[in-house]
Image: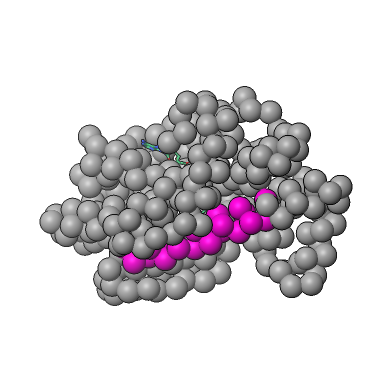
């Protein structure tokens, strides 16, 4: 008998994850702030809950896949929030990319009322989520983690366990996203260099991947970047900016200078300020191209230029 699961947050990632849990046979409740996004899952057998509390009441394992730390706070601690609906011994699995401090706060809040908290952020874009091939970084108390493992496995091609303290998983995820963001920055600079001299970026990407750099990161992002295929986004630039901000905040708390993260942050901030926050995060390359005097490949009216947070 499969444990009943709830998924709260049905955006680009949460929706395909919920669909895969239904397909895997888990009894499923779902909730989303914008209810319309949840309705298609009802046809597959999911119960659409009117509040996070109601979704939690129906489940042993409650997944959140929300945008950021603020969204987690709103959903967990708000009126008819997740915490109010957690049954004793139920397990909240936070799968968003959030700062480690948020996980520490959530662990304390759950412990105080007899429920459990795990952090299990993921690597992989929405199309990877749709294929149930995410890579999960999980941390938390061993017993609840064992209970949640079948659910995490149903969503992923692998689960790495990085300790009993949930915040460790968030730290590892942020380290990974820092590497991804710095790869985008260096790829954008290399592309600007060859493009300014009149070379074709896609051809250069193929040459470099063949020579030495073959990796799904360079392949997928390099293709998007060189084609200017920024919309619809796989991973929104505004969320990438949020992640680098969390990297720098965590680095500050730990006393770790990260100058490369600073460069990436400035370029993501600049891209968001120019209205590109709603595009794919590879659109950060446009900032680098413009600095090199190359004509923009994309306009700047796709998101609110003031709201870059
Ligand atoms: N996309 C990727 O490639 C990717 C990869 C790995 C990890 N992640 C991480 O996964 C998380 C989700 O990403 P995503 O791409 O699915 O984002 P998304 O498409 O923007 O979805 C965000 C979700 O959060 C909800 N939300 C936002 N603010 C809220 C609030 N104040 N109260 C209640 N609900 C709120 C949204 O509800 P509404 O529908 O009502 O707006 C939506 O369900 C993020 O932490 C992201 O960094 C994303």
What percent of the width, then of the height, locates residue 297?
74, 35
Q: Is residue 125 or residue 237 the one in the foreground?
A: 237
In the image, is residue 12 part of the stretch drawn in magenta?
Answer: no
Q: In this view, does 280 lie to the left or right of 80?
A: right
Dominant secondary structure of the magenta stretch? Answer: helix
Residue at figure coordinates x 42%, y 48% from the top left? 245
Q: Give the number of marks.
A: 0
Residue at figure coordinates x 76%, y 34% from the top left? 295
Residue 243 visible in the picture: yes
Given the current orientation, which residue lies at the most extreme left position? 112
- The boundaries of the magenta stretch are 167-188
Q: Is residue 96 left or right of residue 125?
A: left
Q: Is residue 299 or residue 39 the one in the foreground?
A: 299
Q: Is residue 219 or residue 39 the one in the foreground?
A: 219
Residue 151 visible in the picture: no
In the image, is residue 177 part of the stretch drawn in magenta?
Answer: yes
Q: In which quarter of the image is the C terminus?
A: top left
């Amino acid at each position: 008998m499969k444990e009943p699961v709830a998924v709260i947050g049905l955006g680009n990632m949460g929706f395909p994850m919920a669909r895969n849990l239904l397909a895997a046979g888990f009894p499923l409740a779902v909730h989303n702030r914008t209810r319309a996004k949840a309705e298609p899952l009802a046809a597959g057998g999911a119960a659409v809950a009117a509040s996070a509390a109601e979704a939690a009441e129906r489940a042993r394992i409650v997944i959140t896949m929300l945008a950021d730390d603020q969204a987690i706070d709103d959903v967990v601690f708000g009126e008819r929030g997740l915490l109010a609906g957690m049954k004793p011994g139920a397990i909240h699995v936070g799968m968003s990319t959030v700062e480690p401090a948020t996980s520490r706060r959530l662990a304390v809040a759950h412990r105080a009322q007899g429920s459990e908290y795990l952090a299990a952020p993921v690597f992989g874009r929405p199309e990877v989520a749709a294929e149930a091939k995410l890579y999960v970084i999980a941390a938390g108390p061993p017993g609840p983690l064992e209970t949640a493992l079948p659910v995490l496995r149903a969503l992923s091609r692998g689960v790495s366990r990085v300790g009993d303290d949930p915040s460790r998983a968030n730290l590892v995820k942020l380290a990974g996203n820092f590497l991804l963001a710095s790869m985008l920055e260096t790829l954008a600079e290399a592309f600007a260099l060859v493009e300014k001299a009149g070379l074709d970026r896609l051809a250069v990407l193929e040459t470099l991947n063949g020579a030495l750099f073959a990796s799904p990161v360079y392949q997928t992002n390099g293709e998007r970047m060189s084609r200017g295929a920024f919309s619809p986004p796989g991973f929104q630039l505004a969320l990438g900016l949020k992640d680098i901000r969390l990297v720098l905040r965590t680095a500050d708390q730990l006393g770790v200078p990260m100058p490369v993260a600073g460069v990436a942050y400035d370029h993501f901030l600049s891209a968001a300020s120019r209205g590109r926050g709603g595009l794919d995060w590879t659109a950060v390359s446009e900032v680098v191209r413009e600095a090199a005097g190359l004509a923009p490949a994309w306009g700047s009216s796709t998101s609110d230029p003031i709201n870059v947070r």
